[in-house]
């Protein structure tokens, strides 16, 4: 089943000129970009995005970090995209993440880990709604979809 996931290139990813690199990985994998906004997020939506972490020692720092500078918020679409993007992001901390993953290749920090990706279908639905109206998500067909996903799987 086709899924959508919310991806955010965090302030460190933008400031470190890694947006193109990160988007390029998702493009080359064959995912479809369905929506994008370059913006500085205010604290309130960040608190909602990370509400499961409310009360944890890193929470206030995380809210300050995510709202401190511009980010690129995107919706990516494909069958199984939620789990695939989590794998491509790597483990939460750059110091733990495997080489070959975004966090493993480009960072060593715990908090400044470049990218956010929804961790489940439920999270994706909630998170996409925080940043996009339904008419801001673009419905179209990739012309190479048959070559990317095959007709013989
Ligand atoms: P995830 O982004 O891999 O899903 P979560 O555990 O959901 O990781 O944490 C959300 C975000 O909070 C992380 O991406 C990271 O930026 C930040 N974070 C999590 N744990 C710590 C910590 O121990 N120190 C500093 N920042 C943290
Ligand atoms: Mg998480």
Image (cartoon, rainbow, N blue to C red):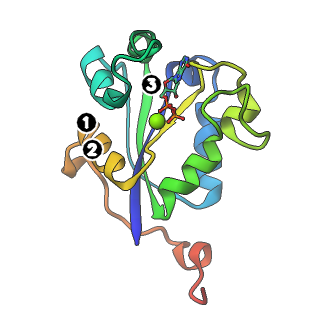
Pointer 3 with pointer 1, Cβ within 8 A: no
Quadrant location, the C terminus: bottom right
User: Ligand 2 closer than 8 Å to the CB at disc 2?
Assistant: no
Q: Mark 2 points at which residue?
A: 126
Mark 3 or 1, nearer chain start: 3
Q: Residue at x 50, y 58 (%)?
A: 81
Q: Does 54 sit left or right of 13 as displayed?
A: left
Q: Secondary structure beneath disc 3?
A: strand
Q: Which residue lies furthest to the bottom in this view?
A: 152
Please state which of residues 97 and 81 is positioned toward the viewer in this rendering: 97
Question: In this figure, which residue is indicated by the disc labeled 1?
Answer: 130
Q: Position of residue 62 (x, y in %)?
A: 44, 16
Q: Nearer the viewer, residue 47 or 142?
A: 47
Q: Distance between the residues labelled 3 and 1?
A: 14 Å
Q: What residue would you read off at disc 3? A: 71
Give the vertical position of 61 relative to 25 (above or below): above
Q: How many labels does the image show?
A: 3
Neighbour class for label 2 at 10 Å: few (<14), some, many (≥20)?
Answer: some
Measured as percent of width and height from the top left, residue 31 is found at 53, 58
């Amino acid at each position: 089943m086709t899924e959508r996931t919310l991806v955010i290139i965090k302030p460190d990813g933008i400031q470190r000129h890694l947006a193109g690199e990160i988007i390029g990985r998702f493009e080359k994998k064959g995912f479809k970009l369905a929506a994008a906004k370059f913006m500085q997020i205010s604290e309130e939506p960040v608190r909602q995005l990370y509400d499961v972490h409310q009360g944890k020692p890193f929470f206030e720092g995380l809210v300050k970090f995510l709202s401190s500078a511009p980010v690129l918020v995107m919706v990516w679409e494909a069958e199984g995209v939620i789990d695939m993007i989590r794998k491509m992001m790597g483990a939460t901390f750059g110091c733990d993440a495997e080489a070959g993953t975004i966090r493993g290749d480009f960072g060593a920090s715990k908090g400044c880990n470049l990218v956010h990706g929804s961790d489940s279908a439920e999270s994706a639905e909630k998170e996409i709604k925080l940043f996009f109206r339904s008419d801001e998500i673009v419905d179209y067909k990739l012309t190479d979809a048959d070559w990317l996903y095959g007709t013989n799987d």
